[in-house]
Image (cartoon, rainbow, N blue to C red):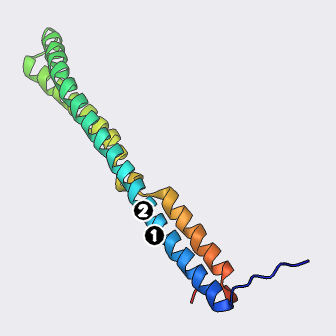
Amino acid sequence: MIATDPRSLPELVSGLVANFTDLVRKESELVRAELGEKLADAKRAGASMAVGAALLLGGFLVLLEAIVLALSKAMDPLWASIIVGVVAAVAGIVFVRVGAKGVQPSSLTPDRSARQLRKDVHLAKTMTPGGALR
């Protein structure tokens, strides 16, 4: 035996629209929450990079000076300083690029929410007469 719904078609459509509106509102709240999480992650990554860079700078300068002093025993101190400076600059560029990848805009996108919104739109399209939202 098939149970019939006592609601009329306009009531059903009105309920569907109300439920869909509520779903979109909740999904937008989810997007905001996920963006907040991503921004907090980016802030932590940036703070970690800054602290690490400050600590590395002090130690690295001392080590660079030690390398310059050691090379000065085998060559002119000017050339020793130039060689050490170039090598340090290249290494610094590599480290900055690696750290910057952690805070690129692509890592801040709300992937889960966007995927869920696409599923919701697809579901809404399949539930409406004719397969399209009106």
Q: Position of residue 60 (x, y in %)?
A: 20, 21
**Quadrant in the rendering for residue 82:** top left
Is 24 in front, or is 94? Answer: 24
Is 36 in front, or is 86? Answer: 36
Vertical placement of 107 versus 75: above or below? below
Write the residue at 8% across / 22% down: 78
Q: Which mark is residue 29?
A: 2
Find disc 1 in the rendering and name its residue. 25
Q: Position of residue 94 (x, y in %)?
A: 31, 37
Write the residue at 19% across / 31% down: 86
Q: How many numbered markers are drawn?
A: 2
Distance (Cα) linking label 2 and label 1: 6 Å
Residue contact between numbered discs 2 and 1, judged by CB atoms under 8 Å: yes
- Which amino acid type is marked by label 2? Glu
Kindly state the secondary structure of the residue where label 2 is placed. Answer: helix
Q: Which quadrant of the figure contains the C terminus?
A: bottom right
Vertical placement of 64 versus 30: above or below? above
Q: Which quadrant of the figure contains the N terminus?
A: bottom right
- Which amino acid type is marked by label 1? Arg
Most distant residue in the front direction:
6
Q: Report whether 6 appears left or right of 117.
A: right
Vertical placement of 79 versus 40: above or below? above
Write the residue at 42% across / 62% down: 29
Q: Position of residue 19 (x, y in %)?
A: 56, 74
Q: Position of residue 44 (x, y in %)?
A: 30, 39
Kindly state the secondary structure of the residue where label 1 is placed. Answer: helix
